[in-house]
Amino acid sequence: MSNIFSLSFTEFIAIATLLVGLVSVVFVGIQLWQKYRMDHSKQVLDMLNKTRSERSIAELLYQLDYNKFHYDGYFHGSQTEQLVDNVLHYYEYILYLRDRNILNKKEFQFFEYDIQRIVCNHDMQSYFFTLYHFVSDKLSFKYQRLLKYGRKNGWIDKDFNNEDSKKYTRGLIIDKNR
């Protein structure tokens, strides 16, 4: 059994260099982790700020809150449809980040109320209903995550699956013979 005092000077320097290297690696690892967390926090803050400052998001949420959003035959092809699609894509992306665990539960809570406001709105559900039943492959429905989240939370009822449901306003005529 050897003893640290019986090491040669060269062996002592080699061990000391190894220890300094290990401490440096740990220190750099801690610094990188802290930088990652700060960058991630800034990204979440930027996303949150976008929900408050982006005109299209603020405008749509206002329309939903005050029942000024209407889904009808004039909706498709309108500027309102473009506004709605931009906002829905943004929240669809937020749900994608949550599903991938890039946003944790606490971070997601910042966006959850807005998603609830969107998905619970009857006219928005009618828009989802029309798009969902318009596509032949239900997996290609472009707001899958919003729909899934709404179903999971009980905001969208089972009648949504019934293509003949009279509960939802239709903005497009759906040809069942296609």
Image (tube, rainbow, N blue to C red):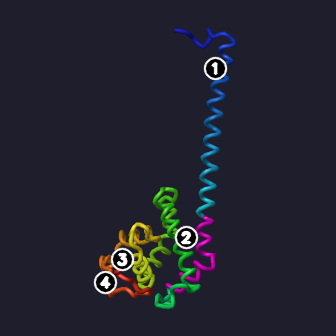
Name the residue beneath numbered marker 2. Answer: 90
40 or 124, nearer to the observer: 124
Q: CA distance from mark 2 to mark 4?
A: 30 Å
Question: Residue shown at 32%/76% (left/top)?
Answer: 161
**Image vertical order of residue 127 relative to residue 4, above or below:** below
User: Where does label 4 land, which residue?
Assistant: 164
* Residue at x-position 48% and y-position 56%: 101
Q: Which amino acid type is shown beneath numbered disc 2? A: Tyr
Residue 15 marker: 1
* Residue beneath disc 3: 156
Residue 142, above or below 60: above
Contact, CB < 8 Å: mark 1 with mark 2? no
Within 10 Å of the Cα at label 3, are there few (<14), some (14-19), or many (20+) other Cα atoms?
Answer: some
| Label 2 vs label 4, nearer the camera | 4
Query: How packed is label 2: few (under 14 Cα within 10 Å), some, or many (20 or more)?
Result: some
Task: Count up the numbered dots.
Answer: 4
What is the x, y in percent for residue 114? 50, 75
Q: Percent position (x, y) of residue 53? A: 64, 76
Q: CA distance from mark 1 to mark 2?
A: 54 Å
Which secondary structure, mark 1? helix
Q: Secondary structure at mark 4?
A: loop
Q: Secondary structure at mark 2?
A: helix
The residues bearing labels 1 and 3 have C-alpha atoms spaced at a distance of 65 Å
Dot 3 falls on a residue whose secondary structure is loop
Image x and y of residue 56, in percent: 60, 79
Quadrant holding the C terminus: bottom left
Q: Quadrant of residue 78?
A: bottom right
Q: In the image, 111: left or right of 32?
A: left
Q: Amino acid at mark 3?
A: Ile
